[in-house]
Image (cartoon, helix red, strand yellow):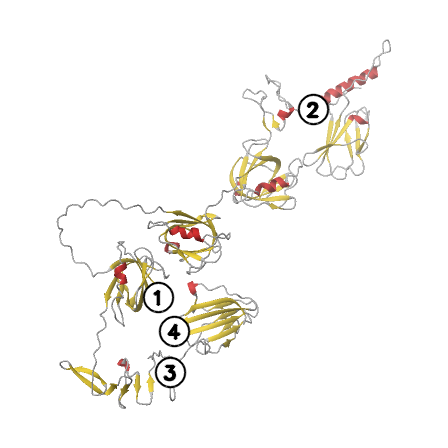
Amino acid sequence: MTVSSTTVKNSYSGNDSTTEFAYTFKIFADTDLQVIIRSSTGTETTKTLTTHYTVSGAGDASGGNVTFTSGNTPATGETVVIRRGVPQTQAIDYIANDPFPAESHEEGLDRATMTIQQMQEELDRSFKVSRTNSITTPEFTEDAATRASKTLGFDSTGNVLTTVADFLPAGGDSAMFQYSTTTTDADPGAGKFRLNHATISSATEMYIDDLEYNGTDVTAWVQSWDDVSGNDTNRGRIRISKANTLDTWMVFKVSGAITDATGYSKITLVYIDSAGSFADDDKVFIAFTASGEDGAIPGYFYKFDTNTADSDPGAGEVKFNNGTYASATAIYINDADSNGASTATDVQSWGGSTSTIKGSLHIVDINDSSTYARFKITAAVTDASGYNKITVAHLASNNTFSATDELSITFVRAGDKGTTGDTGSTGSTGSTGATGASGTNSQLAMTWSSSTSDADPGAGKIAFNHATLSSVSILYVDDADDASADITSYVQSWDDVSNAEARGIVTVTKEGTPSTYATFKVSGAVTDASGYTKVPVTHVVSSGSFSNTDGVGVHFSYSGADGAGTSLSGSTNNTVATVTGANALIGEANLTFDGTNLLVASTGKIYLNDAGGEHISGNGSVLSIAGGSEIDLTATAIDINGTCDVSGLSTFSAANVTQQALTSSSNAVAWDATAKPNAVHITTENTTFSAPTNNVEGAFIALEINYNGSHTIAFNTVFEFAASTAPTFTSTDGKTDILVFRYSGAVWQEVGRTLNLSES
């Protein structure tokens, strides 16, 4: 016969049901066939005759069939390849003088032809140059060990490289995958990966199968991509390169922890760059390069407390005395950092420089370096109970810290003040200049600070102890004015006058706006604090309001000293006298003082502040007090004979006011402040305390909250809490919170609190 067909193999697709597949070329024996199954991932498996399949049609010029045995049916996605594999041997032996064996000879030619066809099929799948091309040096000399994991290359002349490149792309560990254009969060399939967005630059997640293209499990490798500690936003870089096109690639950084899903991993990405485009099922190399670990963060670690009160912020915490960082003048820092390490001694050394500026503090959010605050330390550090107080001036800041934010605090010490240089020679006296215009009334030029804390308000500044001018009772005056002149002695002289009513008058006037001012009486002895003076005052009159950093003029006028007393002598008793004419004294017979008692004649009266009528009158048996007047009683005991009518007056004392219950209705509590100044509320529901009724200016009320269940507590806006922030109430069954308020005439101001007590 002749060999008229060049076909040496047939290919078919499996479908989970077909078991018989035809081959269309001649073979001499069943063993002349090779049956290969290729999986969907490209894995090839050569099957075994009789074990996996049987053959029919050997010797037939048109071929025959391959039938798969039970349990070996090709599956959907698998490819069946039937290939001729005639042995490359010559079995014909010619015997001398025998007749010529035509059939045997022809069979030998057929086998030779089939072998050539098989070799041609192999060559057709091989890399080769065209018939018009040539390679001067078509071979390379590297041994197998040198060639391992390398790729074949060509030099600048087109010849085979003698030094070949790495097979895997440079830049870290790599594996081969196929690209899927699907964007859903799901397993992309064996050997595949996908992004969560069709536009590569908009992708924020990658979904990558646990198996790479060749079926190797790479789960552990992929999930190690987030192993870098500390560098949370850049764990490493992923480069994805198209296998057959070097100029098609995309690069991302791993920006978070990797999620182990079922059969695949989810990776949080940040796009960096890309080139070219990818199509569905493109083969790619995925290479990963880990980032280096973050370096150690310097300084002490603390958590931020948003409260601004001068108190211990709590273990491992730090706070400022003002929520506006530019207005902060003090920092309160616990004696231990957030790791429990003691910092007290080191922090107290921060004020040790002999320079005016002791050093600088840099406070930064360790999770967001763009959020920071920098201050200069302007005084020695104060050792309080369990915390240190640092006097500061704001330098710069950006954004604000939130409660419990983790901060790093670093300190840079200023150098000590240098020695004073030699005094230079005195220059000659210049000519006398022209007399200047008369200046304004003598006063100190200073800057007003909105801080109400008992602390140095800062260089050249004055501050009050209350934001409401009419409620101010203490002035805090820095030891220097705006021109840095030392005013300590002058300010501390404001109490030198012995006057029971007022040592003098202080007026603070806004610079350029004389209609904005506040006038006070100096009502007691001044106190020399560290770097500033505390002046006790009583408000007289004020107009307008001051803003932080307003320029102000501070003017002080001394009162006259108390005059000396003069003794009047009568016959037996001293007599109250009046002056008439030319210094004549006339005794008033109806009002006399015998050294012990002030005696009023039966027809006489005593008047106080008589502008609107009598306020106090006596007729020998009755003492009446008009509304709005007061009697200040300082005796340890008051002896009243007869009837004392105190109707219309309200008194409060924790020692003698019986505690009375407040009950809620529809989640609200109505509170009569006069009837129930000492109240207790046992919760039965989430409760809001309404605005109290029958309020009296200056009155105090106390509230005990007993939690009968886990209920929330809220207050009407007429209740004003410390630092304008309501406390976090306990709201725990069996616990007690206690609060005390004072009525200002407009709001009930919190003056005390004790939280999380055991129920009595």
Q: Residue furthest top?
A: 97
Measure how far apart labels 2 and 4 are at the Cα level: 106 Å
Residue closest to the eye, 194 or 544: 544
Measure how far apart labels 1 and 2 are at the Cα level: 98 Å
State yes or no: discs 2 and 3 in contact (Cβ < 8 Å): no
Measure how far apart labels 3 and 1 are at the Cα level: 36 Å
Question: Can residue 102 be seen from the camera position used here?
Answer: yes
Mark 2 or mark 3, earlier in chain: 2
Residue closest to the eye, 523 or 217: 523
Above or below for 333 versus 738:
above
Q: Amino acid at mark 1?
A: Thr
Mark 3 or mark 1, earlier in chain: 1
Q: Quadrant of the C terminus?
A: bottom right
Question: Can residue 509 be seen from the camera position used here?
Answer: no
- Mark 2 secondary-structure assignment: helix
Q: Amino acid at mark 3?
A: Ile
Badge 4 is on which residue?
Answer: 698
The residue mark sitting in front, 1 or 4, is 4
Sort mark 2 into few (<14), some (14-19) or many (20+) by Cα contacts within 10 Å. few
Badge 3 is on which residue?
Answer: 638
Q: Amino acid at mark 2?
A: Glu
Q: Quadrant of the N terminus?
A: top right
Q: Residue furthest right?
A: 98
Above or below for 326 versus 590:
above
Measure how far apart labels 3 and 4 are at the Cα level: 23 Å
**Residue 242, position as x, y percentages in the image:** 58, 34
**Residue 562, position as x, y percentages in the image:** 23, 72
The residue mark sitting in front, 1 or 2, is 1
**Mark sitting on residue 122:** 2
| Quarter of the rendering containing residue 194 | top right
State yes or no: discs 3 and 1 in contact (Cβ < 8 Å): no
Badge 1 is on which residue?
Answer: 468
